[in-house]
Amino acid sequence: MLDNADLLFDEQACRSALVRLAGEITADLGSRYPFVLPVMGGAVVFTGQLLPLLDFPLDFDYVHVSRYGDKLEGGSFNWLRAPQEGVAGRHVLVLDDILDEGHTMAAIKRQVLDLGAASCATAVFADKNTGKEKPVRADYVGISVPDRYVFGYGMDAAGAWRNLGAVYALRG
């Protein structure tokens, strides 16, 4: 698969985007003792790299919802772990690997707010330029990627290559 892919962002570019994001999040949420809620499993790399750069106290939990599984196109929602009631009254920051069509992030944000969160901000490592209206926009974006199938840095290709430190796009 890697032989049929183009490098979009190397490891240094990914790291620079991450450091910038951490600064933006710290400026906005650092004094609010936020509740950080990554979306597993895509956000695992992004979250693992971002958390040490956030120099403020926070609480942490996770959600696990999937629209893809091991397929290359979206399907129905599969909630493996929904947001918990501990978000009530809190400033929540939802982290995900990519904002593609935006349906998953919109559903998570809606659920968090329905549980009584004081606010719900969203951060994604990558925002895909689909050219279509999305039901939600990310408050914090690391990189913008073209409307191609991208993988690496937490984003998978048919279940593989989440572990890459760079971002690639499949050709054709």
Image: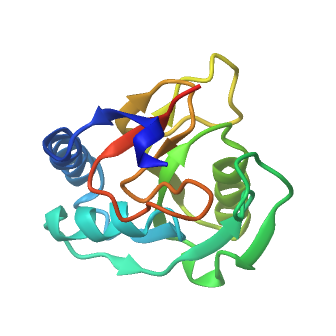
Q: Looking at the image, can residue 48 be seen? A: yes
Q: Nearer the viewer, residue 157 or 147?
A: 157
Res 110 → quadrant: bottom right
Residue 168 percent coordinates (x, y): 39, 40
* Rendered position, 68 above or below 106: below
* Rendered position, 122 above or below 64: above
User: Furthest residue to the right?
Assistant: 76
Left or right: residue 67 versus residue 119 is: right
Q: Nearer the viewer, residue 156 or 97?
A: 156
Residue 29 percent coordinates (x, y): 30, 56
Res 68 → quadrant: bottom right
Left or right: residue 72 versus residue 23 is: right
Residue 48 percent coordinates (x, y): 29, 71
- Residue under the image location 36 percent in, 55 percent down: 153
- Residue under the image location 47 percent in, 38 percent down: 4
Left or right: residue 134 versus residue 170 is: right
Q: Nearer the viewer, residue 106 or 40?
A: 40
Q: Nearer the viewer, residue 119 or 109?
A: 109
Q: Looking at the image, can residue 139 be seen? A: no
The color scheme shown is: rainbow
- Marker count (numbered): 0
- Residue under the image location 31 percent in, 63 percent down: 32
User: Furthest residue to the front?
Assistant: 3
- Residue under the image location 48 percent in, 63 percent down: 92
Locate the C terminus by quadrant. top right
